[in-house]
Image (cartoon, rainbow, N blue to C red):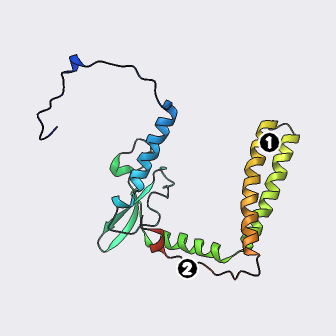
Amino acid sequence: MRNTSKKPRPQADWVAIPMKPIIDRETFDAARAEMAINTERSARNNCRNPYLLRFLVVFGLCGCHITGISHTPYTYYRCTSKRTGSKKAIPHDDTVSVRHSKPDDLVWNALVDLLDDPARLEEHIARLDAEEARILDAYRENVIDLSQLKSQMEKLSAKRAHLNALRETLGRPTEPLQRPQVTRDMLGKT
């Protein structure tokens, strides 16, 4: 309380009023965890270098997210579990760093290839057909019960509807399809 003559009352004068929580503890904890992830990944926390995969890739040796670091003039992805002493990580003594351009280019090129190949859509639809057959077999063999069958079939139905909508959009001869011109800058710096 700056620039005011108001002063807080002593804690002994406080009147405690029991309140019913607005949300349950599980929802509160999930929201707090999501806020922590958002803080980590926030672009404003890394303004100097454009790391495409920052905090999106997990280091296989320990299970920690990799971060971007800079050693002028190069930038790297590095596991920080050793430096930060992460309690969630599997302990290891290796210091692993990779120039950030290599994995960024691999992922970016794979994304561009996926956008350039509409035939992959048909592969995904065929995979859904096979997945549906496996789920029905599991139900017939009493591996899953009716509620699990319904749940799985609803998920498949939603995926199928999405893929069919994409197929319909791609198959319209009256609308010329142009490859979207997407750049890394359009996706924002991470």
Task: Give the residue at mark 2.
Answer: 181
Give the x, y percent position of residue 173.
77, 81
Q: Amino acid at mark 1?
A: Leu
| Circle number at residue 21 | none
Q: Quadrant of the N terminus?
A: top left
Residue, x 47% and y 72% (percent of image)? 186
Residue, x 11% and y 41% (percent of image)? 3
Q: What separation in Å lies between label 2 and label 1 (alpha carbons)?
A: 41 Å
Q: Amino acid at mark 2?
A: Gln
Q: Does 96 sit above or below residue 35? A: below
Q: Nearer the viewer, residue 158 or 33?
A: 158
Q: Does 53 sit above or below residue 146? A: below
Residue, x 75% and y 59% (percent of image)? 161
Task: Give the residue at mark 1.
Answer: 149
Q: Residues within 10 Å of mark 1 (few under 14, many from 20)?
A: some
Give the x, y percent position of residue 59.
48, 55
Front of the two marks 2 and 1: 2
Task: Say what secondary structure mark 2 lies in.
Answer: loop
Q: Nearer the viewer, residue 25 or 16?
A: 16
Give the x, y percent position of residue 72.
29, 72
Q: Quadrant of the C terminus?
A: bottom left
Q: Quadrant of residue 79?
A: bottom left
Q: Nearer the viewer, residue 123 or 10?
A: 10
Q: Does 75 sit above or below residue 1? A: below
Give the total of numbered labels: 2
Give the x, y percent position of residue 108.
53, 72
Determine whether, in the image, residue 161 is placed left or right of residue 25. Answer: right
Q: Residues within 10 Å of mark 2 (few under 14, many from 20)?
A: few
Task: Say what secondary structure mark 1 lies in.
Answer: helix
